[in-house]
Amino acid sequence: MNIKPEVNAARLLASVADFAAIGATPAGGVNRQALGVEDRIARRLLAERALARGFTVFQDEIANLFIRREGKDASLPPLLIGSHLDSQPTGGRFDGALGTLSAFEVLEALADAGTETDRAVEVVAFTNEEGSRYSPGCMGSMAFSGAGKLADWQTTHATDGPVLADELAATLAALPEAAVRPIGHAISAFVELHIEQGPILERENVPIGVVTAVQGTKWLEIVFSGEAAHAGTTPLEFRKDPMSAAAMVIASLQSAIMPADPQARLTIGRIAAEPGSINVIPSSVTFTVDIRHPDAETLAAMERHVRQECETASRHWHCDVAINRRVDMAPAQFASSITETIADTCAALDLKSRPMVSGAFHDALFVSRVAPTAMIFVPCRNGISHNEAEFVSDAHMISGARVLLGVVGSLLLAG
Ligand code: HGY
Ligand code: MN
Ligand code: MN
């Protein structure tokens, strides 16, 4: 007799709590940065739970972690679900983890019900989605989709020092039970559940977002180089001050970009001065620019605007300027076949849903290049994320996982 698979709510909530304890921070968030010790602990816990359920575990060469529940026909490309386990340094305990653990709950629900599927279902935890410790973000999904090459990142240094190749080797070695497979295998579709990380769903009291697209993102690293000099003896006309150049650019961009376009996003997240002494005019100042927009052409114009402002400040303050583009993610549209399945599943579960564009980038942005892909959003309190106060209610976690299970069931039935 076919039992209908059901989400085990208590198991899901306990699982989210278990992983929230890995890299837990005093303010209720997590610090589980990519390829670090805590990331490896989380990967091991998930792998051990998978093996205990009789699933198989794989890693590819960039340490994307896959958990596979076999189908009747191993030759069919698997249906892929999942997200990421790495976090921001002061991240929330739901960003990435909820999507990965909800996907694992779907596998367990299928196993509990003894559901036979034609194709395998795989859960993935992509490596380094956040891009905070190692830039760029979405390394694992970029490599998986062919949008980036592992070879280009091996010598990248982490913000805390270690080179990527070493941390990657340690991460792969820490999970010998996971057979290593080549990067980028065929899949039938990808569905990622994630927290919205914004205020819309909560404000409209809608429990599910049907994500139809992801806006574009560019990350620029800007270095102004001037001349170190004495803070007390150097008059204005003798100064080649990179901090003044950086301040001029930052103030100009912040007054011009977001006030002029409510869809535009500009964030200066990191700034550092060398030598960083209180009484030395810096020799150089490095800062990051994160710009985003749903329209590719507008995003390109925003980048040109940033570059022009840097050239102006460079001339004005007699400093050199170097601009490195670290991330260039074009906006992505998701597959209507998947978004319609998500909307239909919500209706069948009597859950309100609404279509929306993601302001955050996600692994799904890249996977959508190689397979029909879409995302399911659940609300987070006050829209707060990338913050230890990030919070998702039990009810919203359970609804999200039930929708994911329903979508998986529909996609498997569709063949
Ligand atoms: O920055 C982002 O959009 C993602 O949450 N890492
Ligand atoms: Mn995320
Ligand atoms: Mn994030």
Image (tube, grey):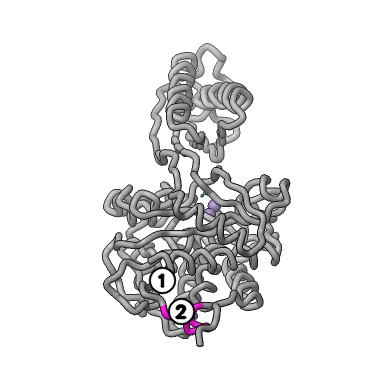
| Three-letter code for the amino acid on which mark 1 is drawn | Val
| Three-letter code for the amino acid on which mark 2 is drawn | Ala
**Is label 1 within 8 A of ligand 2 (CB to nearest ligand atom)?**
no
Q: Which residue does the numbered mark 1 point to in the structure image? A: 121
Residue pictured at 56% horizontal, 34% vertical: 265
Which part of the image, by quadrant, shows the C terminus? bottom left
Tell me if 194 is positioned left or right of 284 in this view.
right
Q: Which residues are magenta?
A: 110-116
Question: Is any atom of residue 160 visible in this view?
Answer: no
Number of labelled discs? 2
Mark 1 or 2 closer to N-term?
2
From the top left corner, tell me how far across and down residue 293 is, in percent.
51, 34
Give me the C-alpha separation between circle 1 and circle 2. 13 Å
From the top left corner, tell me how far across and down residue 32 is, in percent.
53, 62
Q: Secondary structure at mark 1?
A: strand
Label 1 crowd (10 A; few <14 / some 14-19 / many >=20) = many
Tell me, for residue 69, which label it has, or none. none
Q: Secondary structure at mark 2?
A: helix
Tell me, for residue 50, which label it has, or none. 2
* For residue 17, above or below residue 158: below
* For residue 292, above or below residue 90: above
The magenta stretch spans residue 111: yes
From the top left corner, tell me how far across and down residue 217 is, in percent.
47, 39
Q: Residue 414 or 22: which is nearer the viewer?
A: 414
Label 2 crowd (10 A; few <14 / some 14-19 / many >=20) = many
Q: Residue 242 or 47: which is nearer the viewer?
A: 47
